[in-house]
Amino acid sequence: MLLKFKQAIQLESVQTLVRHIEKRFEIQLVYLDGANDASLSRQECRNWEPALFTTSEIIKVLAGPDFSPQLCEVKEIVSVINEIESYISNYILKNSRYNDVVFGELIGPSEIMQSLFARTQNVAMTHSTVLIRGENGVGKDLLAQEIHSRSSRKDEVFIAQNCAAIPSALIESEFFGHRKGAFSGATQDRPGLFDRANGGTLFLDEIGDMPLAMQTRLLRAVEMGQFSPVGGDQIKAVDVRLIFATHRDLGAMVRDGLFREDLYYRIKVVELRIPPLRERKGDVEVLVHHFLKRLVDKGYSRKTIAADTLAFLSSRNWPGNVRQLDNELERALIFSGDAEELQIEHFSDDAAKKFVEPRNLTTTMPAQVEILERELILLALKKHGWNKTQAAKTLGISRRNLIRKVGKYHLETKS
């Protein structure tokens, strides 16, 4: 079998990986990387059969010249190659320099995410209160869990609570607990979030949605680690690491009188901001392959994704951020039916209906023009069943010009 590495990987890592694969699967491998393609002559390269199975962007696995269909069923061969592909992908993520891409459940090779990972690692081993800022869907909860798992409290409890999900009438009891008889329905003593998180970490999401009256009570618990249960006069002390998160601009809320200034400065001892996906579009390709692999692990069919579709997904702004991308990929796998490759039309109208975001200056004008041009050509081809003559008439260009652009944007076939 031939391994073709599409990205530069240190030669030592490649050799180690090849030895692992050969030992585990009892096969012989020839491997190439970008710097060592000359290790095989052109004649030797021509002897390799066409690709039997295409993996992620990291490798391509090809069947060797001695392959005989009579030796075993094709489906068994594909199954073995799939297993090798999964093994290689996991090996590279765990044992090569690509390990820096993954930070717990968060993934991001971009410089801005690498900086966030480094800062988070430094913060995790402290006991400081942390405020995580970021839009909905960026993974604030995942970062909070990672801070806990890398801290000295990792073996203690981690409790997460969305402040917006607690009714105003019950929020004080939920946080600090209550004594029996404190109010109608309080038939027994009940510990609150601070009690239950004692010794561990308490993650309070959407702190910007907390009512002002409750902010006053929370301030004392944040400052001194002390509180009184509802209906009780005994002061309780706890040892809790606090992590807060919000998608709101708390500074603006302070100026508008909607958030207490003293609480604001208490909870932002350390502030970490997770950038939206539109600020790190280079991460989209890595995220797509990660999510597709995870969906396969959940039982979905393994499918490839067209290069132009991947480029399209990377061009989107993704207002719902990583969560939206994940959901869209799952939807695409469901609605792609028997197709072996994901195309743009398999995604929802919300994701695919518009290629150009108005007032978006994250890409150059020529790039935006190309995106729009591709969309118009695709629409015309779909309308006329890929009849290029009719599509060219609709677009008002020559057939020869259309054929050139179809090749440029990889729109040669319906699939």
Image (cartoon, helix red, strand yellow):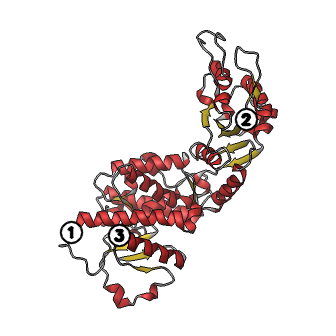
Of labels 3 and 1, the one closer to you = 3
Q: Residues within 10 Å of mark 1 (few under 14, many from 20)?
A: few
Q: CA distance from mark 3 to mark 2?
A: 51 Å
Query: Label 1 sits on what residue type?
Result: Cys
Q: Earlier in the sequence, mark 3 or mark 1?
A: 3
Q: In the image, what residue type sits under mark 3?
A: Phe
- Report x, y in % for residue 371: 49, 61
Q: Nearer the viewer, residue 395 or 319?
A: 319
- Marks 1 & 2, CB-CB < 8 Å contact: no
Q: Is residue 1 left or right of residue 374?
A: left
Q: Nearer the viewer, residue 364 or 350?
A: 350
Q: Residue at x 25, y 64 (%)?
A: 76
Q: In the rendered image, which residue does mark 3 sit on?
A: 25
**First in sequence: mark 3 vs mark 2:** 3
Element under disc 1? loop
Front-most of residues 114 and 180? 180
Q: Position of residue 23 (x, y in %)?
A: 39, 72
Q: Type of residue at label 2? A: Asp
Q: Residue at x 35, y 51 (%)?
A: 300
Which quarter of the rendered picture does the N terminus lie within?
Answer: bottom left
- Which secondary structure, mark 2? loop
N-terminal label among 1 and 2: 1
Report the number of numbered marks. 3
Where is residue 166? Give x, y as percent. 60, 25
Q: Which residue is mark 1?
A: 72
